[in-house]
């Protein structure tokens, strides 16, 4: 049966479904409890049971000792409620409470979904998971000491693998490695999560416009999947529109997935925009620059939040024109700029 949980000191409440751990319920309902491995090994999710009973689940005996159990502690990634609960733990407050880690990972799968976009799936060690906010990124650590930044494209609740979207471009040394030399089972080291590009919770009834160019879709995919996941547990829905721009049709990948979102969620709309459509594209949709399409569709953005991700010229133009021409509040614009790293800057 389901059980109610009261979290102190925040006062948040959760409904835990049968066979669901406390952490699983929190992730499903969008409450950010700290966690690391999600299998009872690291102890990051350890908190206190103030009232009620739990099944402690399978865990490392050194991570949660019998003495700690007697003192009321539990590992929320393993603990199954047996009654109504009151628990005490520190909730994650945006990025400042999330631990930045340096971890190894193994290339689990390489999926070249277009001529110039590779989807990389990374598997972490068995006793590790990466806690992150939807929209954040990681830095791949190269042997020469350099870094390459990639947004995490999967949502936090779906973290068995880390999904990265890599674009091939002239002069990109790491991009060339990804497309020509990287193999499944290769080992990569990374640091993360990093960045402040994540969905702000307030106002919950506000409208959101996402503007992406190219693989700037990756962090927005993470955010949208996280929002859709939360909507299954929350009653409120924010109206959201994704404007995604590319030069040609081939640069807009995973569009079947986006159209499926639009079909399944009445509060989500998708508007693809091409700036240099080819005759072979047979393009019947919007043309021009992607941020111009937003300007054409809205006389005012006063009651909106805008999340823009992609090429610097697009992000800069969107910020300038939206705030100066459409009354977008400057604190309502959030961005992540994708700057290519080449051997000849």
Image: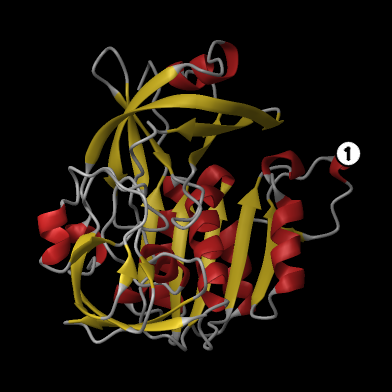
Residue shown at the point (42%, 32%) measured from the top left: 340
**Relative to 101, is 325 on the left or the right?**
right
Can you give x and y, in whole percent of width and height, for residue 279 in the image? 87, 41
Can you give x and y, in whole percent of width and height, for residue 325 in the image? 45, 77
Up/down of 314 relative to 172, above or below: below
Residue shown at the point (77%, 70%) measured from the top left: 263
Disc 1 on helix, strand or loop? helix
**Relative to 172, is 76 on the left or the right?**
left
Q: Is residue 167 visible?
A: yes
Say how the picture is coloured: secondary structure
Residue shown at the point (44%, 65%) measured from the top left: 307
Up/down of 129 relative to 102, above or below: below
The residue carrying pointer 1 sits among few (fewer than 14), some (14 to 19) or many (20 or more) residues within 10 Å by Cα, namely: few
**Relative to 235, is 82 on the left or the right?**
left
Up/down of 334 relative to 163, above or below: below
Residue shown at the point (15%, 69%) measured from the top left: 72
Q: Which residue is mark 1?
A: 280
Can you give x and y, in whole percent of width and height, for residue 239 in the image? 57, 81
Up/down of 87 relative to 318, above or below: below
Q: Nearer the viewer, residue 284 or 262?
A: 262
Q: Quadrant of residue 298?
A: bottom right
Q: Is residue 168 visible?
A: no
**Relative to 260, is 337 on the left or the right?**
left
Q: Quadrant of residue 143?
A: top left
Question: How many numbered callouts?
Answer: 1
Can you give x and y, in whole percent of width and height, for residue 169 in the image? 55, 25
Quadrant for the C terminus, please.
top left
């Amino acid at each position: 049966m389901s059980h109610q949980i009261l979290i102190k000191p925040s006062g948040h409440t959760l409904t835990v479904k049968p066979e669901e751990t406390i952490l699983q319920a929190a992730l499903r309902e969008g409450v950010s409890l700290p966690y690391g491995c999600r299998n009872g090994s690291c102890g990051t999710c350890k908190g206190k049971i103030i009232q009620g009973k739990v099944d402690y689940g399978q865990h490392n005996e050194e991570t949660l000792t019998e003495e700690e159990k007697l003192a009321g502690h539990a590992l929320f990634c393993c603990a199954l409620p047996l009654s109504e609960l009151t628990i005490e733990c520190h909730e994650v407050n945006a990025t400042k409470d999330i631990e930045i880690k340096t971890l190894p990972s193994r290339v689990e799968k390489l999926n070249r979904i277009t001529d110039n976009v590779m989807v990389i799936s990374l598997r972490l060690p068995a006793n590790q998971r990466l806690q992150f906010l939807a929209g954040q990124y990681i830095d791949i650590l190269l042997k020469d000491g350099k870094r390459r930044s990639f947004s995490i494209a999967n949502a936090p609740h779906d973290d068995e693998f880390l999904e990265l979207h890599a674009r091939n471009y002239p002069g990109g040394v790491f991009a060339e490695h990804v497309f020509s030399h990287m193999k499944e089972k290769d080992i990569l080291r990374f640091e993360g999560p990093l960045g402040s590009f994540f969905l702000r919770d307030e106002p919950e009834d506000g409208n959101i416009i996402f503007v992406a160019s190219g693989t700037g879709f990756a962090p927005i995919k993470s955010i949208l999947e996280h929002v859709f996941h939360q909507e299954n547990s929350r009653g409120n829905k924010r109206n959201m529109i994704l404007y995604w721009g590319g030069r040609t049709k081939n640069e807009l990948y995973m569009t079947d997935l986006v159209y499926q979102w639009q079909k399944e969620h009445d509060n989500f709309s998708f508007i693809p925009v091409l700036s240099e459509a080819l005759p072979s594209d047979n393009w019947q949709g919007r043309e021009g620059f992607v941020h111009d399409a937003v300007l054409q569709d809205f006389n005012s953005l006063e009651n909106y939040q805008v999340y823009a991700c992609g090429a610097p010229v697009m992000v800069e133009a969107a910020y300038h024109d939206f705030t100066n021409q459409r009354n977008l509040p400057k604190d309502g614009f959030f961005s992540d700029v994708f700057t290519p790293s080449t051997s000849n800057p």
